[in-house]
Amino acid sequence: MNLLSDFCFPASVAVIGVSADTSAFGTLYLGALLKFGFKGKLYPVNRRGGSVLGMSVYSSLEGVPGDVDLAVISVPGRAVVGTLEDCLKKGIKTAIVLSAGFGETDIEGKKLEEELAMVVAKGIRVIGPNCHGVYCPRSGMTLVPGSNFPRESGPVALISQSGGFAEMIVLQSRGIGIRYSKVISYGNAVDVGESDFLEALAEDADTKIIMAYVEGVKDGRRFLEVVRRTSKVKPVLIWKAGLTDMGRRAAGSHTGSLAGSKFLWDTFFAQSGAVQIGSTDDLIDTALAFLNLPPRIGRRVALVTGSGGAGVIGSDACERLNLSMPTLSAEAQHRISSLLPSIGTSVRNPVDLATPRPRTSVLTGVLEAVAASDEIDIIVLGRMFLSSKGPELVLGLKNRPEEYREDLLEIPLTIRQQFGKPIVVVLSEEVTDREMIDFEADRRSVRDFYLSHGIPVYPTLERAVSALANVVRYRERFDHTSVAL
C-alpha cells in the first residue's frame, strides 16, 4: 500500500527534462498535470533554467526549495543514471522514468538498464523506464498525455506494460462509464513491476477489479503466486500479449520483454484463476460485466430476440463458451405462445419475437414468463429496438400508439427488480453513413440509460456472451457470493 501512496499521492513532483519545445515528453507531462488539476507542488527542472508554461524552471534539483516526493524524469536515456543519482542526493525516494532507449533497444540499451538497476539498489523506487506514468483521479496525477482523462474516480485499476495501451483503454472505456482508481504504466520494470502493483492493488480499498496488460514478466513464479492470491479476493483480468511469433518479436522491441510460450501461459491461467483476455474489446466488455452483474450468477441463459438469426448467433456463442440455454418449461412456453403469433416465432429458448419492435404488453409478458422460470439464471435481450425513434430511423416505420409506448425502455428495469434476474442488453451498431447519425445518437441514449441503471450493454451478441462467460467462470471458481463490486 505504501507503493501506491508514494507513486499515486505525492505532495510534490519535480518534472526533470522540461523544455521550450511543448511537444517534448517532459513538457507534455508538466502540461498534463497542470491541466488535469494536480494540487500538489510542481517543480520544472532543466539545466538551462528559464520558464515553461508560465512556470519558473529550476536549473538543478539542488536548487528546488524543500522536499520532493516524486521525480518524473524525461531526459535522454544516457542522462537518466546521473539524474537518478541527483535524486538520491536530494533525498527523493521515488521516481518515474519516462525516458526510453534501454533494454527494449539493443545491447547498449541493456547495459544502460543494468546501470540504472545499480542506482535503484542504492535506495530509490522507480517505475519505468520507457513508460507513461501514473493516473490517479483522486490525487490529480495523470499519464502523459492524459490531461483529458475523466476526473471521477472509480473501482477499476489497470496496470499496463505499454503506456500507449493504458491511454487507449482509459479513453475507450470512458464513454461507457468505466472509471479508474489507478492506472499504472510501468514499461521495462527495472525496479517495481506487475507483481508489486498487483500485491498493492489486492489490498487497495478503492479497487474492486484489476485489469492488466502484460507482455512479459520478470519473475514468473512470483507473478503466479501473486495473481493466485489476488484472484481470491477480486477479479484479475489479464491480457497476455505476445503469444504469437510476431507478437513475441514485437514485445522484445517494445519493452524488452521475454514473452514466453502459449503453452506456458495457458498453464498459468489454469492455475492462477485470472480471467484470460484476448482483445481490447474483451477487456472492456468483461470489466463492464463484472461491474454490473451480481456476485452470484449462474450459466443458464435465456435469449430473447427480435429475429431468428440473432437467436441462432447467440445460441452458437453460448455453446462455444459453455453457457447453457435450457428449454423453457411447458408453463413458460404456454404463457409466451399466448402472446405471440403462431407463425415465425419461437418459444422454447431462444425466444424469437419475430419483430425487432415488440409491443409493450408483449415484451412485458414474455420477460415475465422467462424471468419466472426456475431454469433461467440470466436474460440476454437482443436485436430489437427499445426506443420510440429506432424503428423509424432505421426501418422507416412509425409506431402506432397502441403498438408502442415510451415506457418500453423501462421494462427490463422493472423485470429485473421484480424477479431479481440480471439482464444484459444488446444494441446493434447499425450506422453506415452520415444519414444514420440520428440513429447512433438514439442508440447511445438508450445505452447510457441502461448503463446508468446497472444493466450492461453490448454492440453484438458474441461480445455480450463472451463477457458473461468470463464472469460466470470466475464466479464458479471462487464463489464470490459475499463480494459486492
Image (cartoon, helix red, strand yellow):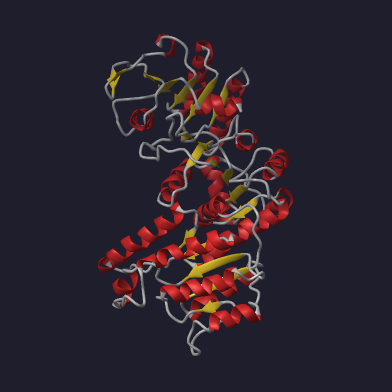
Residue 414 locus on image (x, y percent): 49, 62
Residue at left 50%, top 12%? Answer: 90
Residue 435 locus on image (x, y percent): 25, 68
Asked if one can make out residue 262 in the rendered structure from this viewpoint, the answer is: no
Q: Is residue 269 above or below residue 108?
A: below
Q: Is residue 421 above or below residue 79?
A: below
Q: Quadrant of residue 472?
A: bottom right
Give the side of residue 66 with respect to residue 484, left or right. Answer: left
Residue reaching furthest to the bottom: 343
Residue at left 45%, top 25%? Answer: 73
Residue 48 locus on image (x, y percent): 33, 16
Residue nearest the observer in this picture, 194 or 155: 155
Q: Is residue 108 above or below residue 69?
A: below
Residue nearest the observer in this picture, 232 or 146: 232
Locate the N terminus by quadrant. Answer: top right
Residue 281 locus on image (x, y percent): 49, 57
Q: Quadrant of residue 140?
A: top left
Q: How many marks?
A: 0
